[in-house]
Amino acid sequence: MMMMVKKSAPALLVLLVLLVLPLALQVSGWRWSPASLGGDGPYWFVITQSVSQPWGILSAALLGGVVVRLLALRGRAALRLFLLLMLCVGSAQGVNAGIKRWIQAPRPYVLSLTAAAGVAPADFYARSAAARHDWVRRHVASQPAWLGDHWARETGFAFPSGHGLFVATWVALAAIVLPRRRYAVMVPLLAWAAAVMYSRFALGMHWPRDLLAAVLLGWLWALPFGWYIHRRGLSGGQIG
């Protein structure tokens, strides 16, 4: 048990790091508005696309390959670890989809567009996905084309953040599975995760609470997978 606690300590540390941004925005009372999107919007769009489909699948495969490579696994062991990593990240997204349908929290940009059009958010979400897509396309004439396209593709609910969950799960997995002092890996990974999280705020996709929940869920979801990976001897050492 003590070894399990030690192995999860790095994941707890990165959890605290990832919580700083959404906590700061939550405490400050930050609220998104179309006017808050500055000239750096295209930059944040590129960052967020690294997790959006189909690029998110490529990012997952790349990250899984990097973890396997760093652990110097070969053959069947490498495949098993890669599949476990994909299962962890993929199943977390399935849970995220279920929570979204249960909570049904509107996205910031949806509240902005529906308020301007005099439409209740509940009426917007009562439409089919295709109808929501078309509705958004008709009401984003004043926004850049790339942003209108992004909003029209992502018309689902806000809580929790799927993008935030994706990066939080990967950061937690890497912190648990990889040997300590992998600063050359963890620092860029944390920077990327923080950038993705901020991009969701900047583009009007999420509230701070959405990212807070995503980080906590990603950490909790990664822990049992990380422990199992250690027990199976796929991380260079088993938990005793």
Image (tube, rainbow, N blue to C red):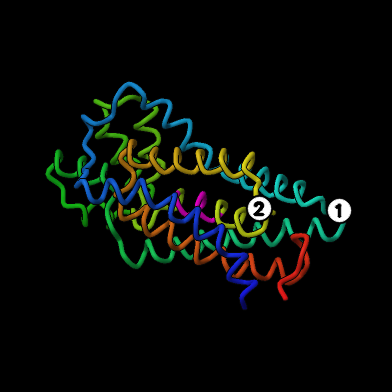
In primary-sequence order, the first of circles 1 and 2 is 1
Vertical order, 237 against 119 (above or below):
below
Element type where label 1 sits in the image: loop
Which-is-in-front pick, marks 1 and 2?
A: 2
Predominant secondary structure in magenta?
helix
Mark 1 sits on what residue? 74
Q: Give residue 180's mark.
A: 2
What residue type is disc 2 on?
Answer: Arg
x 66%, y 53%: residue: 180
139 vs 54, nearest the viewer: 54
Question: Which quarter of the rendering shows the N terminus?
Answer: bottom right
Measured as percent of width and height from the top left, residue 123 is found at: 21, 55
For badge 1, the amino acid type reads Arg
Picture layout, residue 84 above or below residue 156: below
Q: Quadrant location of the C terminus?
A: bottom right
**How far is the residue under mark 1 from the one under mark 2?**
21 Å
The image quarter in which residue 99 lies: bottom left
Stretch of the chain drawn in magenta = 164-169
- Residue plotted at (33% across, 36% down): 202
Q: Residues within 10 Å of mark 1 (few under 14, many from 20)?
A: few
Q: Residue at x 62, y 65 (%)?
A: 7
**Tag 1 and tag 2, C-beta contact below 8 Å:** no
* Image x and y of residue 59, in percent: 61, 42
